[in-house]
Image (spheres, grey):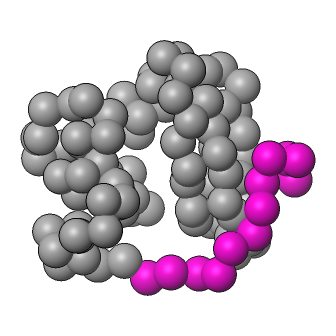
Amino acid sequence: MHEDAQHSQDTIVTTKDLKNNSNNIGLWILNLKTLELSWSQEAFSILNKPVTDKFEVSELLSLLTPDSQQILVDQFKDLVNDQKSFTLNLKTVTDTILRFHG
């Protein structure tokens, strides 16, 4: 496990939660079967991206520094394979810090 990773309690987020988000928190859901991401409008706003129906995993990773990309991929594998939750603060290519919970 990476030093940047901190475990958090599991949270279930639904598509309805994405639409009704009023906490100024960007939310996203990854469909593990299709690898399709669904994003809240706030997530697009935080990332200065136009709101679209689809946002690919590769697009998300491209926003992160190479080290941060690898940390997120490794932690996500642990989440899927071993149900290990995580909280990460990862650096983007524009020097912004994004927090990820899984």
Q: Quick one: quadrant of the C terminus?
A: bottom right
39 horizontally vs 25: left or right: left
Depth check: give the residue in front, 57 or 16.
16
Magenta: main secondary structure: loop
Depth check: give the residue in front, 81 or 59.
59
101 horizontally vs 87: left or right: left
Q: Which contiguous range is marked in magenta? A: 1-12
Numbered-mark total: 0
Could you tell me which residue is drawn at 66 percent across and 60 percent down? 87
Task: Place residue 46 in its image quadrant.
Answer: top left
Decide: is 33 above or below 9: above
Depth check: give the residue in front, 62 or 81.
62
Look at the image and say whether residue 2 sits in the magenta stretch.
Answer: yes
Residue 23 x, y percent position in the rendering:
31, 68
Decide: is 82 above or below 89: below
Residue 14 x, y percent position in the rendering:
29, 78
Asked whether the viewer can see residue 92, the reply is yes
Residue 24 x, y percent position in the rendering:
30, 59
Look at the image and say whether residue 26 sits in the magenta stretch.
Answer: no
79 horizontally vs 93: left or right: right
Residue 55 x, y percent position in the rendering:
26, 40
Could you tell me which residue is drawn at 50 percent across and 81 percent down? 11
Depth check: give the residue in front, 37 or 98.
98
Decide: is 35 above or below 70: below
Could you tell me which residue is drawn at 37 percent across and 77 percent down? 13
Could you tell me which residue is drawn at 24 percent across and 42 percent down? 44
Task: Place residue 30 in its image quadrant.
Answer: bottom left
Asked whether the viewer can see residue 38, the reply is no
19 horizontally vs 38: left or right: left
